[in-house]
Image: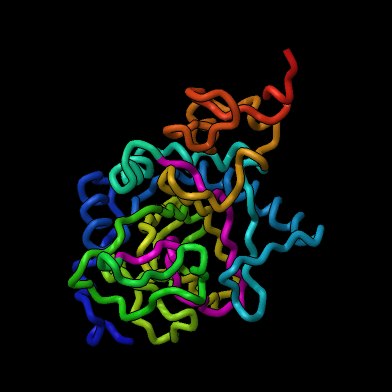
Amino acid sequence: MTATNLPWDPAILPRPTRDPARLKSDMATFGYCLIEQAFDAAEIATIRQRLEEQAEAERKGGYHTMSYVQDAAGLNQWVNMLINKGMAFQAALFHPLIRGVVDHVLGADYFLSEISASITHPGSGLLPFHTDQWWMPVPQMPGADYRRSGDITRTKTVTGPPTPANHPINPPMAVNAMTMVADFTEENGATRLVPYSHLSGLQPEPTMPNSCPSVPASGPAGTVVLWEGRTWHAVGGNASDASRYGLVTLFTAPQVRTMQNFTLGTKPEVLAEASPELIDLLGFKVWYSYGQTDLLGAKLAKPAADLIGELKP
């Protein structure tokens, strides 16, 4: 679809900026925003070196991880649980501009749901469009039948066009921040976004055709693109001769089960060096009694080895 017949004016779409007010405004209006040069060349070089080493070792070791949204050729690679795979990746968790946008969208309390790498290798195709909160039940009128929360799957959602709704919809419950560890271009598979789709209250069809109007989140390495949980997006196809590296940090509201189970899966040596802020972000923080493991009123969940078991007087 050419710029002349897009359902929006390309001239008003978000551009990379470091203005906090503009970032928040872009997120509210379009469902996404871009931070200009969030990380400098040296920081990106450190992240990329560690990521390339890890990705190559995992491929050679047979740990090539697929996601639920995967290209038919299997050329996209995900490197999961980066919390265990290098301190360099933690820089994306505490960047003030990233966290400022997340604070604005989700509020004072939230957890890290995922920290992974999305690597799009040459020859991969455009992935299906989806949202990061496909699991949300839609609002219903009192007394009306409803879609059971436990019956919702990625292929059993309420779908429709990405146009603004004229009735109440769910608020955002997630924010995804993708750090561009390589230059993101339309040719090499930059994340594609559908402006205004966050206002529809609907999900895209699981096999949304490639003709769905969208824009590439393009920018030089060090740029960060953020989108909220209702925004339609997809990994673009890579028609270049080089891999596209992105660092994914997904934040979710504290009521939501996280994609990666950090309380179970974070290595002890990582926790031993973790700051109190990181411990909270990983979900060890008890949120109004949710996430507790033993004593009521505890601020942090304790591992099983430290808990009281069966007792006798």
Q: Position of residue 155 (x, y in %)?
A: 51, 76
Residue 197 placement, left or right of 69: left
Residue placed farthest to the right in the image?
61
Quadrant where the C terminus sits is: top right
Q: Is residue 208 above or below residue 108?
A: below
Q: Is residue 288 part of the magenta span, yes or no?
A: no
Q: Is residue 118 part of the magenta span, yes or no?
A: yes
Q: Position of residue 64 (x, y in %)?
A: 72, 63
Q: Nearer the viewer, residue 166 or 292?
A: 292
Q: Nearer the viewer, residue 158 or 313?
A: 313
Q: Is residue 212 above or below residue 285?
A: below
Residue drawn 26% across and 65% down? Answer: 142
Q: Tag count in the figure? A: 0
Range of residues picked out in magenta:
110-139
**Residue 107: quadrant of the picture:** top left
**Residue 243: quadrant of the picture:** bottom right
Q: Is residue 86 above or below residue 311?
A: below
Residue drawn 30% across and 56% down? Answer: 171
Residue placed farthest to the top in the image?
313
Q: Position of residue 198 (x, y in %)?
A: 30, 65
Residue drawn 66% across and 40% down? Answer: 264
What colour scheme does the image use? rainbow
Task: Please indicate, yes or no, whether residue 210 appears anywhere in the rendered image.
Answer: yes
Secondary structure mostly taken by the magenta-highlighted segment of the chain: loop
Task: Please indicate, yes or no, whether residue 195 appears anywhere in the rendered image.
Answer: no
Residue 77 placement, left or right of 154: right
Q: Position of residue 173 (x, y in %)?
A: 37, 53
Residue drawn 30% across and 76% down? Answer: 162
Quadrant where the N terminus sits is: bottom left
